[in-house]
Image (cartoon, coloured by chain):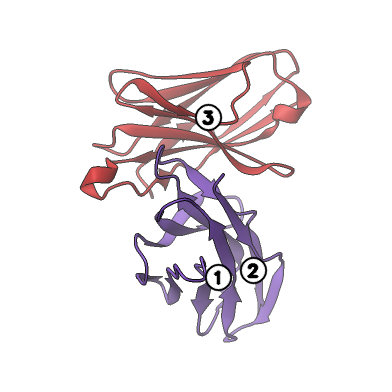
């Protein structure tokens, strides 16, 4: 158990809909990362938050957004869903690099299926 | 930009065979390097890491050495077990953003 939790585990929805994925980081970790794992794109970094602020952005679509709340949990919002958004979405958390704690620990993922 | 290249899979081995999964990287500077493992139906688990040149990461019988001269971080295990069957991902940590850049993954299948 990595200490990172994600809900829900599975999500089935229809095209055009909007969903919210939730992540709780390990205790004490300030950084949260979101990744997408799909068969054609592999594992791709989407976005990073550090202590409530957006820190880095990767290949995240404009239809997708995220935020990190004061209690450090994070949510990834996916809207106007398309079939191609079906994937496994992972959240990871880490401590600060300067403290040598940059290793990212992953949650179990949310499997999204868009029909 | 930074990138990671892994050998194509699947790698199919008999139990107790020697395992090598090749990983090379392209990066500016000296990133930290990682191996993650994904068992069927599960998330990513950190297997081992190395943060500087010549560091050797090890865990559960797996080893990998950070080779700056060959920009490589090959994963090895002396004697694999059926329970090692999984997908293995090599990754580097971007120095500017801390995001992980992953290779495509290598599926390992171990048969009794």
Query: Label 2 crowding class (10 Å Cα cut-off): few <14, some 14-19, many 20+?
Result: many
On the same chain: label 3 and label 2? Answer: no
Q: Secondary structure at mark 3?
A: loop
Q: Is residue A30 left or right of residue B50?
A: left
Please state, as top left, top right, bottom left or bottom right, where the C terminus of chain A lies in the image.
top right
**Residue B38 can be seen in this image:** no
On the same chain: label 3 and label 1? Answer: no
Say which chain tag 3 marks: A
Label 3 vs label 2, nearer the camera: 2
Q: Does B92 sit above or below residue A8?
A: below
Residue under the point 21% across and 46% down: A99
Label 2 vs label 1, nearer the camera: 2
Residue under the point 74% across and 43% down: A40
Q: CA distance from mark 2 to mark 1?
A: 7 Å
Image spot of residue A46 (x, y percent): 54, 31
- Residue A31 sits in quarter: top left
Image spot of residue B8 (x, y percent): 71, 64
Task: Identify the residue under disc 3.
Answer: A8
Label 3 vs label 1, nearer the camera: 1
Task: Identify the residue under disc 2.
Answer: B108
Callouts 2 and 1 close, C-beta under 8 Å: yes
Task: Identify the residue under disc 1.
Answer: B84
In the rendered image of this protein, which colour is used for chain A?
Answer: red
Callouts 3 and 1 close, C-beta under 8 Å: no
Q: Secondary structure at mark 2?
A: strand
């Amino acid at each position: 158990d990595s200490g990172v939790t994600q809900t829900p585990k599975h999500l089935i929805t229809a095209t055009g809909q909007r969903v919210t994925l939730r992540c709780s980081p390990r205790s004490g970790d300030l950084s949260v990362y979101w990744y997408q794992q799909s068969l054609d794109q592999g594992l791709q970094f989407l976005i990073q938050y550090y202590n409530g602020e957006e820190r880095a952005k990767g290949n995240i679509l404009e239809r997708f957004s995220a935020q990190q709340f004061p209690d450090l949990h994070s949510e990834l919002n996916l809207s106007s869903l398309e079939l191609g958004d079906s994937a496994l979405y992972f959240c990871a958390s880490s401590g600060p690099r300067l403290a040598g704690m940059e290793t990212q620990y992953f949650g179990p993922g949310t499997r999204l299926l868009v029909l | 930009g930074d990138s990671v290249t892994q050998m194509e899979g699947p790698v199919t081995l008999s139990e107790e065979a020697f395992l090598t999964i090749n990983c090379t990287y392209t990066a500016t500077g000296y990133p930290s390097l990682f191996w993650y493992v994904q068992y069927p139906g599960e998330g990513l688990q950190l297997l081992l890491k190395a943060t500087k040149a010549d560091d050797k990461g090890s865990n559960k019988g797996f080893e990998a050495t950070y080779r700056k001269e060959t920009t490589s971080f090959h994963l090895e295990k002396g004697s694999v077990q059926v329970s090692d069957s999984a997908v293995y991902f090599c990754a580097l940590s971007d120095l500017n953003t801390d995001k992980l850049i992953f290779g495509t993954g290598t599926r390992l299948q171990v048969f009794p």
